[in-house]
């Protein structure tokens, strides 16, 4: 059936997804397969991120969430962790002004406890500078783990109940969502993971309850605008039912 003739409904996959979330995976393997240090893969991955932000803006995506460092990535060798932290700093310092000029709103999600002071300052400065922007919202997941985020939200809710700010009967789906790092952000419609891995690795477990998943074999440093467009084309072909049934033809 030609999508353009269908009655618009929540289950009709059409248009660009409002919120795309990406697990940017495969930097290390991209580098190793070329005899390069893994850090070079991460450096090239930063270029891919810049391309993807630009493409997302041009395609009219409202929210782009990128998984840049998981709460489990501290298990990597110290030199690799240092390289990743260095790239994070470089990205914020070098790109915030440009993103601000392009009306991008920047936010960070993840646990900030224990992060270096200069990184916390960079987060705060770029969020403050861009908070009133109305174009693309870029969520950078750093030291992010979905279970950790849900636990922090649950602890906050428990505290609010204990201290009388939240009646226990009011602790529902929305009340917990409002205590997640993604409070106020619509759930992702499309989650893309690159490099052929097919797992969530502790990313947006709550928020992706009804997301569509596209797994691309492309390693992140080689991810191009065309790959994002392909993922969106795939998304458009999906039938999002939200537990209901597909509406076929006109309904009385
Ligand atoms: C993604 O690439 C970047 C981070 C996880 C920080 P990887 O570094 O995981 O690359 P592979 O999976 O080892 O190839
Ligand atoms: C997930 O990738 C985290 C990021 C992309 C930042 P990993 O490479 O850390 O995930 P696993 O270890 O393959 O599950
Ligand atoms: Mg990986």
Image (cartoon, rainbow, N blue to C red):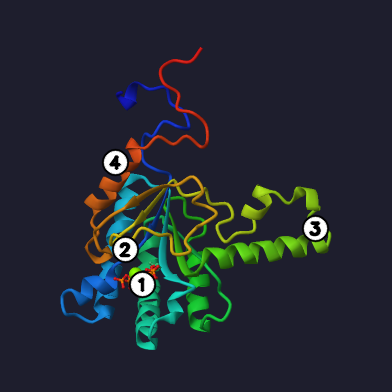
Q: Which residue is mark 4?
A: 233
Label 3 CA crowd tier, 10 Å (few <14, some 14–19, many 20+): few
Please name whichever residue, 117 or 162, is drawn nearer the observer in this view of the structure.
Answer: 162
Residues at badges 1 and 2 in contact (C-beta under 8 Å)? Answer: yes
Structural distance between the alpha carbons of marks 2 and 4: 20 Å
Which badge, 1 or 2, is on the more N-terminal residue?
A: 2
**For residue 158, above or below residue 5:** below
Label of residue 55 in the image: none
Q: Is residue 236 rendered to the left or right of residue 146?
A: left
Q: Position of residue 205 (x, y in %)?
A: 51, 57
Q: Position of residue 187 (x, y in %)?
A: 51, 49
Which badge, 4 or 1, is on the more N-terminal residue?
A: 1
Q: Secondary structure at mark 3?
A: loop
Q: Within the displayed image, which quadrant is ligand 2 positioned in?
A: bottom left
The residue under the point 64% across, 66% down is 152
Structural distance between the alpha carbons of marks 1 and 2: 10 Å
Mark whose residue sits in front, 4 or 3: 4
The residue under the point 48% across, 32% down is 10
Residues at badges 2 and 4 in contact (C-beta under 8 Å)? Answer: no
The residue under the point 56% across, 74% down is 112
Q: Position of residue 78 (x, y in %)?
A: 39, 87
Q: Which residue is mark 1?
A: 91
Please name whichever residue, 194 or 188, is drawn nearer the observer in this view of the structure.
Answer: 194
Total label count?
A: 4
Mark whose residue sits in front, 2 or 4: 4
Structural distance between the alpha carbons of marks 4 and 3: 45 Å
Q: Which residue is mark 3?
A: 165
Structural distance between the alpha carbons of marks 4 and 1: 29 Å
Q: Which residue is mark 2?
A: 49
Which badge, 2 or 4, is on the more N-terminal residue?
A: 2
Which badge, 2 or 3, is on the more N-terminal residue?
A: 2
């Amino acid at each position: 059936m030609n999508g353009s003739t269908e009655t618009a409904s929540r289950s009709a996959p059409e248009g660009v997804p409002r919120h795309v979330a990406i697990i940017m995976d495969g930097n290390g393997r991209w580098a190793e397969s070329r005899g390069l240090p893994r850090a070079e893969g991460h450096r090239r991955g930063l270029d891919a991120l810049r391309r993807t932000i630009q493409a997302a803006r041009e395609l009219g995506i409202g929210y782009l969430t990128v998984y840049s460092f998981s709460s489990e990535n501290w298990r990597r060798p110290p030199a690799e962790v240092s390289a990743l932290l260095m790239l994070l700093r470089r990205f914020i310092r070098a790109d915030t002004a440009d993103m601000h000029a392009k009306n991008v709103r920047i936010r960070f999600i993840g646990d900030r406890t224990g992060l270096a002071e200069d990184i916390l300052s960079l987060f705060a400065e770029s969020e403050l500078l861009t908070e009133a922007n109305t174009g693309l919202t870029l969520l950078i997941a750093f030291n992010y783990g979905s279970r950790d985020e849900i636990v922090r939200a649950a602890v906050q809710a428990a505290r609010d109940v204990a201290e009388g700010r939240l009646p226990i009967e009011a602790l529902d789906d929305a009340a917990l969502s409002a205590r997640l790092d993604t409070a106020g952000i619509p759930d992702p419609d499309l989650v893309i993971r690159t490099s052929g891995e097919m797992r969530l690795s502790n990313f947006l477990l709550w928020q992706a309850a009804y997301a569509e998943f596209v797994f691309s074999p492309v390693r992140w440093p080689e991810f191009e605008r065309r790959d994002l467009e392909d993922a969106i084309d795939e998304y458009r072909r999906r039938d999002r039912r939200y537990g209901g049934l597909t509406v076929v033809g006109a309904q009385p």
